[in-house]
Amino acid sequence: MVKDGYKFALPPLILGTALMAFRLWWGAVFVLLGLFVLYFFRDPERRMPAEPDAVVSPGDGRVVEIVEEPFGPRAGKRISIFLSIFDVHVNRAPVAGRVQRIQYTPGSFMAAWKGKASAENEQNFISIATPAGEMNFKQIAGWVARRILCWTKIGDEVKLGDRIGMIRFGSRVDVWLPMEAEILVQRGQHVAGGATQIARWRYTNQNR
């Protein structure tokens, strides 16, 4: 459980319980709301793949796009994953390495499953340096999500699948891969953050 969940869940739970104590049974709506918030902030343990060249999904959700997309002068591919309000929203490091750049960019809040969300929505860009080069991914806010949390800072060493942040209440994560990476997922597939291997990329995973 992410500890922030308690401060959002306790008020409706307390209010709902108090209302039901006075036989105001519609207080059950607040109790159910509080229980759903606790469910949303769940943070299950995950078993990471053992392959040394594994790239894992940074979040739970459904793959909505796999497109060729350059990153600066480098050719590459982008995998976009949509997180519904029913998915786990803790984000994880797709590779092991050192966090070399974090850049927050304000933007719009269009529905996170739309292609334009990758470029136009509020987002947090994170770059991880590995022996094979940099791995870039984004935390992207959606129509419901209005808060991006990043728990890492520049200079941190992260292991494969380490928790690095979360996005509250519906969102999207994008992973940019170099052309030589082998994509292992397909559009429409449901993936689990830190557990589902989305690609193979020849880098040395020294921090497992």
Image (cartoon, rainbow, N blue to C red):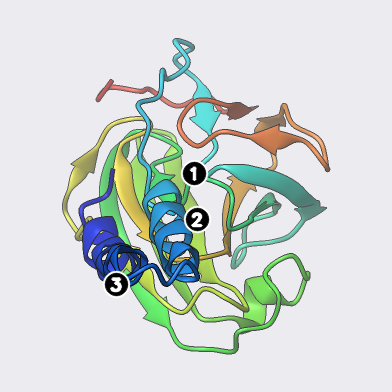
The residue that disc 1 covers is: 58
Please, what secondary structure does the residue beneath circle 3 have? Answer: helix
Q: Is residue 58 visible?
A: yes
Dot label at residue 137: 2
Please, what secondary structure does the residue beneath circle 1 have? Answer: loop
Q: Nearer the viewer, residue 8 or 156?
A: 8
Seen as rendered, the residue at the extreme front is 23
Disc on the earlier residue, 3 or 2: 3
The x, y position of residue 44, in whole percent, is: 37, 32
Q: Is residue 106 above or below residue 61?
A: below
Disc on the earlier residue, 2 or 1: 1
What distance separates the C-alpha of mark 2 from that of mark 1? 8 Å
The x, y position of residue 181, in whole percent, is: 65, 33
Q: How many marks?
A: 3
Q: Nearer the viewer, residue 23 or 26?
A: 23
Tag 2: amino acid = Phe
Q: Residue at x 77, y 36 (%)?
A: 189
Q: Residues within 10 Å of mark 2 (few under 14, many from 20)?
A: many
Q: Quadrant of residue 46?
A: top left
What distance separates the C-alpha of mark 3 from that of mark 2? 40 Å
Q: Residues within 10 Å of mark 1 (few under 14, many from 20)?
A: many
Tag nearer the camera, 1 or 3: 3
Dot label at residue 15: 3
Tag 1: amino acid = Pro
Q: Residues within 10 Å of mark 3 (few under 14, many from 20)?
A: some
